[in-house]
Image: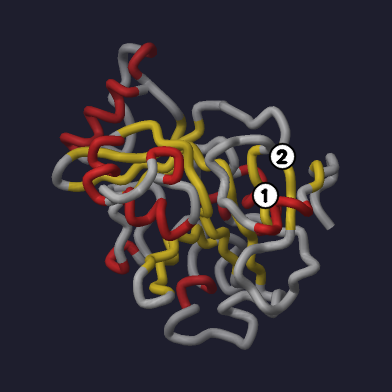
Amino acid sequence: MENWLTSWSKTGLHKPKAGNNSEVGPRILSQSFYGRDTLVVARELLGKIIVVRNRTGISGGRIIETEAYREDDPASHSYRGETPRSSVMFGEPGLAYVYFIYGMYEMLNFVTEKKGTSGAVLIRALEPMFGIEQMIRRSPKALPKLLTSGPGRLTRALGIKLKHNYASLQGPELLVLDDLHKPVSISSTPRVGISEAQDRYWRFFDSGHPGISRARQNSHARPLRPEGAS
């Protein structure tokens, strides 16, 4: 996989060249993966890999924490309808929705649901895998174990900016990959930092992973039932 990612970093290829199967690498998630129920996508993104390509190479990591936001959700930016800010959430699935918050952080979301129905998954934490030296340079004051723990920290470490809003998650700058890794167990809690719909257990994370956000909601964690969270 690392050889394939190095090739992509240099050439911008969306897919590996045919030939040597050992170099094929992971699968790029298709648009149809995102065009489903937001809660399903939020759970199934756990274990997938985000890779960001820039002038200096690649950086990225494995998704270990997400939050779901749907059209019928008072905590969602799209709850009161389409606005200039939320319009991307009503667009094609498989795009990045990036917004600025607290005057200091970009937030990275993945657009879900079919076109015309809003939905997004906030990426809250990663396990660093590639380009860790780049991440440290972008966040020199961060403790190593907190480098990509929390949505603001991870976007800073990856170099995600407002320019990535509407970017495709299939390249050339952003990729989301599936190498068939799955968490052993998943937990759910209420979401973090919202004032409405606090009873919805729409935050999902790799149970017991040390890199998840430090939040008071962690004390309410419960194992995810096979049919998903309510």
- Which residue is nearer to you in this view: 191 or 17? 191
Residue at 46% x, 72% y is: 88
The N terminus lies in quadrant:
top left
Residue 33 visible in the picture: no
Residue at 52% x, 71% y is: 89
Dot 2 alpha-carbon crowd within 10 angstroms: few under 14, some 14 to 19, many 20 or more: many
Q: Position of residue 46 (x, y in %)?
A: 59, 41
Q: Position of residue 108 (x, y in %)?
A: 44, 60
Q: Position of residue 221 (x, y in %)?
A: 76, 49
Callout 1: SS = strand
Left or right: 63 as drawn, with respect to 42:
left
The C terminus lies in quadrant:
bottom right
Q: Are marks 2 and 1 in contact (CB under 8 Å)?
A: yes
Residue bearing the label numbered 1: 204
Residue at 58% x, 52% y is: 214
Three-letter amino acid code of the residue under disc 1: Phe
- Which residue is nearer to you in this view: 12 or 215? 215
Residue bearing the label numbered 2: 186
The part of the image, by quadrant, that contains residue 58 is: top left
- In space, the residues marked 2 and 1 are separated at their CA atoms by 7 Å
Image: 35 above or below 222: below
Residue 75 visible in the picture: yes
Callout 2: SS = strand
